[in-house]
Image (spheres, grey):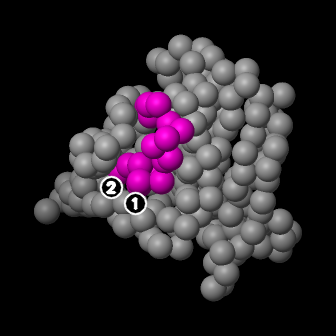
Amino acid sequence: MPESCSSCTHERSRARLMPFGVHLVCGLPIVTRQRQKVVPMASGDVVEIGFGSGLNLPHYDRDRVRHVIGVNPDDGLPTLGRKAIDRHDLSAELLVESAEAMSLPSASADSVVVTYSLCSIPDVEAALNEMRRILKPEGRLFFCEHGRSPSSRVARLQDSLTPPWRFMAAGCHLNRDVGALLKGAGFALEQYDVFDLGLGTRILGTHHIGVAKLR
C-alpha cells in the first residue's frame, strides 16, 4: 500500500476510535468525582460546552435544572451524546456546532457548564467570549478542567510536552491556565481551587475547578 494511503487509513481509524477513547478516559471514577463537585450546582436553563458523550447528565439536579442545551463540534462524540440524552430523564438537546461561534441568543443561559473541554477548544479565548455573551447578567459559569500546574517546574514540563500531546490527544493542551483565561475573558472567580489529583498526575492531573460570574 502506498505510504499516503496507509497514512489516510491510520487517520480514519484514529477518528473512529477517538470518541470511544475520550468517553472511557473522561468517565473514569476519579474524573467523575471531580464533575460531581460542580455540575449539581447548575440551575435554570443550562448550556453545557463540550457536551461530548453526555457524561455530565447523571449529575444535574433535576429539581434545579429546567433544560440543558449541549454544544459540541462534529467530532464523532455527538452520536454518543444523543444516545445519552435518550437514556436520561432530563430535558436536554444537543447542538452540533463550535463553541467559538454559537447560534444561541445572547443572555439566554442561567448557567454555563464546561468540564474537560477548555483544554481542546482551538480558539479558547473566542469560546470564553461566547460563553460570556450567552450568560445572563446574574448567571454563573461552572467549570472543571485540567490545566497548568502552579509549580513552575511542572509547568515548564507541560509546555514542552504539549505539542506532541496535542497530536496524540485530539488537540488537548496540558498547559492552559484556566483561571487566567477566565479573568481575561471578563469573568470574576467566585470560587476557585487548583489541586493535584495525586498518584503522580501533576502533568496531566492538575485540576482547576470553580464558579465564575460576569465582571
Q: Quadrant of the C terminus?
A: top right
Magenta residue span: 53-69
| Amino acid carrying mark 2 in the image | Pro
Tell which residue pokes out farthest to the left in this image.
Answer: 1
Tell me if residue 177 comes above or below residue 48 in the rendering: below
| Amino acid carrying mark 1 in the image | Val
Tell me if residue 193 comes above or below residue 60 in the rendering: below
**Which x, y percent locates residue 126?**
64, 29
Residue 193 on the magenta span: no
**Which x, y percent locates residue 3?**
24, 60
Tell which residue pokes out farthest to the front in this image.
Answer: 63
Which residue shows up at 72% across the image and 51% down it? 210
Picture mark count: 2
What residue is pinned by disc 2?
Answer: 19
**Which x, y percent locates residue 55?**
41, 54
Residue 180 in which image quadrant: top right
Q: Is residue 74 left or right of residue 162?
A: left
Q: Are marks 1 and 2 in contact (CB under 8 Å)?
A: yes
Tell me if residue 109 comes above or below residue 177 in the rendering: above
What residue is pinned by disc 1?
Answer: 22
Residue 73 in which image quadrant: top left
**Which x, y percent locates residue 37?**
62, 59
Q: Quadrant of the N terminus?
A: bottom left
